[in-house]
Every structure is written in structure tokens, then in C-alpha cells.
Image: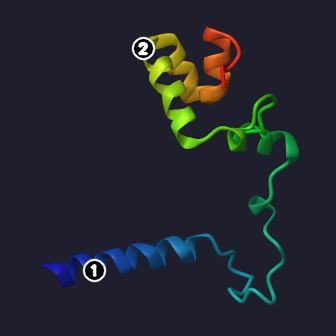
């Protein structure tokens, strides 16, 4: 049963890899031009990669200090949601003011 599953999986991989190649092009990376699909424009990439946050850098705080901020923020559901989206420092300062440390 395992060998049948492995055979089907290998066939699916081979079919997926061969489906992406044009008929008149070879599969050799030395002969094929660069695929433009690998690179994205800067404005599209900024939606995928988060920019660095302004304010207190996490390197300035110890792990214990960050954990205590996280515990305070977890008591408030809105702060906890913002913590997941924007980070602990942004969430804490938005709901509780400046960091006391």
C-alpha cells in the first residue's frame, strides 16, 4: 500500500513539473531565461513583508519584560487581537500608554 501511494505521489510530482514547461523550451536552467514570476514588485512585496515598527525596539526589552507586557495585554481581547496583528509593543502602547520599563 505504501509503495502504491509513493508511486502515485511521484507521478503527480512529475506531471506538475512537466505541465509548467513549454513544448519548445528545454528544462535546463542554463538555457532557460529567468522566470519573472519569482520576482515581485516592491509595492506587492510590502503587503507580504512587514516593515519594521517605529518606537521601542524589542531588542531594548528583555524576554521577561516582553512576557509581562503580553500578560497584561492578554486580559483585553482587543489588545490581544492587535498584539497578534501589529505586535506586542504597538498593542500595549495603544491600549495602556508608554511602556513603564
Q: Residue at x 45, y 12 (%)?
A: 77
Residue 30 tag number: none
In-image side of 18 versus 51 (left or right): left
Quadrant location, the C terminus: top right
In-image side of 88 versus 50 (left or right): left
Rendered position, 23 above or below 97: below
Rendered position, 28 above or below 8: below
Residue 58 place in picture, x, y as percent: 68, 39
Mark 1 surroundings: few (<14), some (14-19) or many (≥20) residues within 10 A: few
Q: Picture quarter containing residue 52?
A: top right
The residue where tag 1 is placed is 6
Q: Residue at x 55, y 75 (%)?
A: 17
Rendered position, 70 above or below 16: above
Quadrant location, the N terminus: bottom left
Q: CA distance from mark 1 to mark 2?
A: 48 Å
Q: Secondary structure at mark 2?
A: loop
Residue 43 place in picture, x, y as percent: 85, 39
Q: Secondary structure at mark 1?
A: helix
Residue 16 place in picture, x, y as percent: 50, 70
Viewer-side residue, 90 vs 7: 90
Viewer-side residue, 82 vs 65: 65
Residue 75 tag number: 2
Q: Residue at x 61, y 10 (%)?
A: 96
Amino acid at each position: 500500500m505504501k509503495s502504491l501511494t509513493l508511486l502515485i505521489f511521484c507521478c503527480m510530482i512529475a506531471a506538475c513539473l512537466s505541465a509548467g514547461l513549454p513544448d519548445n523550451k528545454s528544462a535546463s536552467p542554463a538555457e532557460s531565461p529567468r522566470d519573472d514570476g519569482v520576482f515581485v514588485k516592491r509595492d506587492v512585496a510590502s503587503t507580504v513583508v512587514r516593515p519594521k515598527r517605529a518606537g521601542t525596539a524589542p531588542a531594548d526589552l528583555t524576554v521577561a519584560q516582553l512576557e509581562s507586557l503580553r500578560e497584561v495585554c492578554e486580559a483585553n481581547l482587543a489588545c490581544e487581537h492587535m498584539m497578534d496583528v501589529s505586535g506586542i509593543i504597538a498593542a500595549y502602547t495603544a491600549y495602556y500608554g508608554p511602556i513603564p520599563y
